[in-house]
Image (cartoon, grey):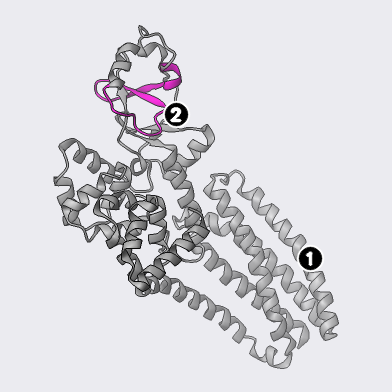
Amino acid sequence: MSDQSTLEHLQTVAESLESGATMQIRYLLNGALPAQDVARLLESSPPKERKLLWELIDHDNQGDVLQYVSEEISVQFMKDMDTERLLAVSEHFDNDDLADILQQLPETLVKEVLASMTAQNRARMESLMSYSEDSAGGLMNTDTITIRPNITIDIVFRFLRRHSELPEMTDNLLVVSRSDRFLGILPLRKLLVADTDTIVRDIMETDCDVIYAHQSAAEVAQLFEKMDLVSAPVIDPETKKLLGRITIDDVVDVIRDEAEHSMLQMAGLDDDEDTFAPIMQTTRRRAVWLGINLITAFIASYVIGLFQDTLDKVVALAILMPIVASMGGIAGSQVLTLVIRGIALNQIGSSNARWLLNREVVVGLINGVLWASVIALLTTVWFGDIKIAYVIAGAIVINLLFAALTGTLLPIALKKLGIDPALAGSVILTTVTDVIGFLSFLGLATLFLL
């Protein structure tokens, strides 16, 4: 469904709710629209309307819809379900997605759900829940097709025909020993053309890409991108036992989430930020970073206050001062964004960080001299004072150099400290460029104009 279609359906729903035409909405939600489109309607509705729409969706269809809405909204709905309904809904989820959601539900509810599962499914779910959500173990699905290496292709075909269907994204059969130790893969492209008397061991591939359960989701995404994989086995790093597999659809979700993560975190927002979250919930989430920003703003204001006498005597400085901070902020943000991207793609390490730093300093110097000259010329024309022009030109060069240094070194340092550069980088960078900009501009003004 396109964005325009979503808005049109939202308008239809709003008009129907206002007129009390719930039958029309019920028809729309339970057949007229596919589950993906209903999910987008829920995500695009304020809390009160969202609750009404959810109640109008038939219980048999709620599971289909839930698998397409964001995790935060899924949890909100599932918290209010009894165990029987929760079990019915959970059948629509892949094991890895269900494990992520269960980890956010009340413990008593999770215990009831696990107790209602078969021993095999419970063991699979507990295994998935033992891994972090952003690790390969938390990303994998336990729905796999495994075979032994010493059987013939004919037996493999007979084994496959016992299944009503193969798991989605199946491009390989996974070969394991009797103890479930991973041995290799049998690609379907080989299976389909092999002689039926051929032994699996003779055509299986042992030199294949595997993923260890502790690897991060970002590393998994990079491997899939580099090797053009459709699926990959996940194994225990110690026992080498097969635990599950990761498929390309899960990796696409990781890539999308990483992109959203960087965008939202740079604004101080949560990854699962709900556009239509309740007022108090949204307020709490944003208040922390507004408070941090307030502290940094006071730091910059304190620096300005140190030069109160200078500002009183040369009023033009107050007019020109925002230009210095703004130029430094923009220049620093450009470098910061580039370096964060490089870190996310694992392109920056100790071997090339120095080269990158040197380049950014040179670029900062060239841009600083270029734009300092332009600003100095405009300042001279505006105020007719060559000294002020020299002062602002010097401050621009200094601030752009510091912006280059900070934009390059800050995300690398934060990464080493285990702090997300996308979350904290922009706040610290803004403080540095503001403080250095004001300090250099007003400091030079104090030395040369008074």
- Location of the C terminus by quadrant is bottom right
Instruction: Please state the horizontal and vertical placement of residue 240, each as a whole percent of the image.
Output: 32, 28
Instruction: Please state the horizontal and vertical placement of residue 52, each as a whole percent of the image.
Output: 30, 66
Q: Amino acid at mark 1?
A: Val
Of tags 1 and 2, the one toward the viewer is 2
Label 2: how many residues lie within 10 Å, few (<14), some (14-19) or many (20+)?
Answer: some
- In the image, taking residue 105 as reference, residue 183 lies left or right, namely right
Q: Secondary structure at mark 1?
A: helix
Compared to residue 315, the image places residue 242 above or below, namely: above
- As for residue 30 lying within the magenta part, the answer is no
Q: Secondary structure at mark 2?
A: loop
Label 1: how many residues lie within 10 Å, few (<14), some (14-19) or many (20+)?
Answer: some
Compared to residue 436, the image places residue 424 above or below, namely: above
Visible residue check, residue 211: yes
- As for residue 172 lying within the magenta part, the answer is yes
Residue at (75, 76) in percent of width and height: 392
Compared to residue 335, the image places residue 280 above or below, namely: below
Q: Quadrant of residue 213?
A: top left
Residue underneath mark 2: 209
Of all residues, the one furthest to the top in this rendering is 197
Q: Which residues are magenta?
A: 162-191
Q: Quadrant of residue 374?
A: bottom right
Q: CA distance from mark 1 to mark 2?
A: 50 Å
Residue at (58, 70) in percent of width and height: 430
Instruction: Please state the horizontal and vertical placement of residue 411, each as a whole percent of the image.
Output: 54, 57
Residue underneath mark 1: 369
Q: Amino acid at mark 2?
A: Asp
Residue at (69, 80) in percent of width and height: 321
